[in-house]
Image: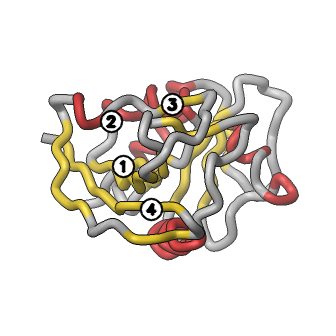
């Protein structure tokens, strides 16, 4: 059975971004992201796509992009222009493949109720974020089913966690 899975990293205050960029450069976390999402579908808001190198879709994945502006259509992406259309395409895709929600903050907030799992890499420091992920540890609809031992990633202490919908 395929799932809808949010995948991201956050700081100690559930901060996820600043100036349309990630808070930390985490090579181990990026390798985990690449390995986990490769060959699957990723779904994101327009600003997330625009934050990628060359504003290009991620390779070896189907990229679904939600833009509220109907004139914004990105090459190599499945372009949608309403949240209802975004959700419909994700639900259809989920019938045959896992769909990874990859940002940004408003997409995570809107999609969290539809997620079956959350793969959250926690960084044990504060990164000065402007955007935040909901505090999933206080969300009664999710429970933490896995937490790795702390490890170093580019000078930051991280823990890989997995939450499942209850």
The residue mark sitting in front, 3 or 4, is 4
Indicate the quadrant containing the C terminus: top left, top right, bottom left or bottom right. top left
- Callout 1 touching callout 2 (CB < 8 Å): yes
Do residues under tags 1 and 4 come within 8 Å of each other at their CB atoms? no
Residue that appears at 68% across and 63% down:
58
Location of mark 1 (residue): 4
Quadrant that contains the N terminus: bottom left
Q: What is the spatial separation of the Cα atoms under label 1 and label 3, in whole angstroms?
A: 20 Å
Q: Residues within 10 Å of mark 1 (few under 14, many from 20)?
A: many
Q: SS of the residue at dot 1?
A: strand
Any mark on residue 157, and which?
4
Instruction: Answer left or right for 102 relative to 75.
Output: left
Residue 164 image label? none
Q: Earlier in the sequence, mark 2 or mark 4?
A: 2
Q: Is residue 80 left or right of residue 90?
A: right
Q: Residue at x 71, y 44 (%)?
A: 21
**Disc 2 secondary structure class:** helix
Q: CA distance from mark 2 to mark 4?
A: 30 Å
Viewer-side label of 1, 3: 3
For disc 2, the marked residue is: 114
Question: Which mark is in front, 1 or 4?
Answer: 4
Q: In the current view of this chain or complex, which residue is farthest to the left? A: 166
Relative to the observer, which residue lies in front, 65 or 110? 110
How many neighbours does mark 3 have within 10 angstroms: few (below 14), some (14-19), or many (20 or more)? some
Of labels 2 and 3, the one closer to you: 3
* Labels 1 and 3: the sequence-earlier one: 1
């Amino acid at each position: 059975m395929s799932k809808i899975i949010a995948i991201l990293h956050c700081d100690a205050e559930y901060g996820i971004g600043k100036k349309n960029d990630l808070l930390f450069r985490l090579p181990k976390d990026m390798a985990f992201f690449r390995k986990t999402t490769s060959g699957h579908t990723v779904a994101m808001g327009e600003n997330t796509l625009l934050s990628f190198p060359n504003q290009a879709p991620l390779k070896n994945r189907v990229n679904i992009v939600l833009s509220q502006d109907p004139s914004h259509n990105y090459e190599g992406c499945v372009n949608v222009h309403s949240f209802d259309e975004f959700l419909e395409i994700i639900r259809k895709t989920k019938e045959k493949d896992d769909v990874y929600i990859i940002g940004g903050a408003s997409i995570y907030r809107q999609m969290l109720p539809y997620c079956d799992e959350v793969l959250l890499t926690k960084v044990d420091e504060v990164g000065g974020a402007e955007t935040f992920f909901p505090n999933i540890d206080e969300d009664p609809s999710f429970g933490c089913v896995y937490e790795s031992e702390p490890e170093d990633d580019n000078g930051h202490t991280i823990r890989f966690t997995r939450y499942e919908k209850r």
